[in-house]
Image (cartoon, helix red, strand yellow):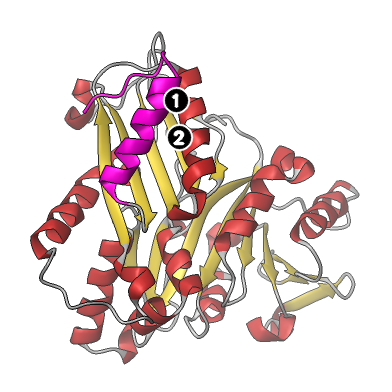
Amino acid sequence: MDSQDKRIPITLLTGFLGAGKTTLLNTLLWQKAFEDAAVFINEFGEVGVDHLLVEKIDEEVLLLDSGCICCSMRGDLPKALRDLFNRAQRKQIPMPKRVIIETTGIADPAPVIYTLLNDHFTAERFRLDGVVTVVAATHGADQIEANIEALKQVTMADRLIISKCDLANAEQLDRLTARLAALNPTASQLQSSKGSVAANDILDCGLYDPASKIPDVAAWLAEVRVEEQSSLRRLSYGKQRAPTPQTAHNTEVESFVLKFDEPLSWSGVSTTLDMLLQEHGEQLLRIKGLVNIKGEPGPRIVQCVQHMRYPSVRLPEWPTDPVYADRKTRLVFITSKLSEAQLRESLSKAAALIARFGVTE
């Protein structure tokens, strides 16, 4: 993928039951940034689009006054995207400039991401632009503690939307923002009341900004926020009460940064990442990295979600931010039941098998 990527960007909109995804979509449908967008939802009635209807193509596709194409997600996602693209090719509907996919409240984002990356037809014509997760300010913190799906939705997000802020008190907001920062310090947080979010704040929230040749790597990698959370966790270690069975899976989520001084070979990095994903896939909720590859003028961007590794991205040059003047490789991890020490041990074992991959402590 590069800055000239012509594939249609897809935003995955997720969030647990009652988070407010549908309310958010209703406020987005008329924004200019959504012109010529396709929105995949589970049921038309849930979004309340009847008064927007211009033309009903069939039982699965509506054309809206706003210029959006509204699609009902019946059946598998690759088929739905294939049908959308083929209809546009036949001039039955406009070719969408972007796609928004709203998942069900109890959906694990990982299988959807896997489908978008691995279905051949889909991957050739669409690209995953970012994962946006909606979390209710009123009860989102409790849902994260009690439901593994809600936890995954948060940890896999590129952007976190805190909804229903008008219904929450300051204590609830403070508790939730702190918890989200601890679970996923790499994702920016936005606060919303009654679905009020600007489309531009959630679109193009993944790695690449189409308006610039080099993305804001510092904001995307969020190395500083991750290290701050790691320091807070170390300070509080041993002071927490023993987790209850309902919350044990959340207390074991960690985030940390590993740095490597010397340039690495891409074959070594690629093989090592694959080995890590094979050994610890379920425990590796997210990996984000800026990697210095031998002989390349700019770094490579790597990103993984559980068992899946995204296609790498080559930057033509190093970011100008002074933080990256040292040109070190930086890998940000969000893990579950996998400590930094355990991960370093796995990396060392992999390095022993791959002579060209150097591990610097």
Q: Residues within 10 Å of mark 2 (few under 14, many from 20)?
A: many
In screen coordinates, is 63 left or right of 160?
Answer: right
Q: In this orientation, which residue lies closer to the viewer: 11 or 269? A: 269
From where the camera sits, is residue 357 visible?
A: yes
Q: Residue at x 59, y 61 (%)?
A: 34
Q: Which badge, 2 or 1, is on the more N-terminal residue? A: 1
Q: Are marks 2 and 1 in contact (CB under 8 Å)?
A: yes
Say what secondary structure mark 1 lies in. Answer: helix
Three-letter amino acid code of the residue under disc 1: Val
**x%, y% of residue 285?**
44, 54
Q: Which residues are magenta?
A: 339-361
**x%, y% of residue 271?**
51, 26
Number of the front mark, 2 or 1: 1
Say what secondary structure mark 2 lies in. Answer: strand
The image quarter containing residue 143 is: bottom left
Determine which residue is flagged by label 1. 269
Q: Residue at x 58, y 29 (%)?
A: 4
- Quadrant in the picture for the N terminus: top right
Q: Main secondary structure of the magenta part?
A: helix
**x%, y% of residue 48?**
66, 85
**x%, y% of residue 167?**
33, 91
Determine which residue is flagged by label 2. 302
The span from disc 2 to disc 1 (Cα, nearest Å) is: 10 Å
In screen coordinates, is 358 left or right of 55?
Answer: left
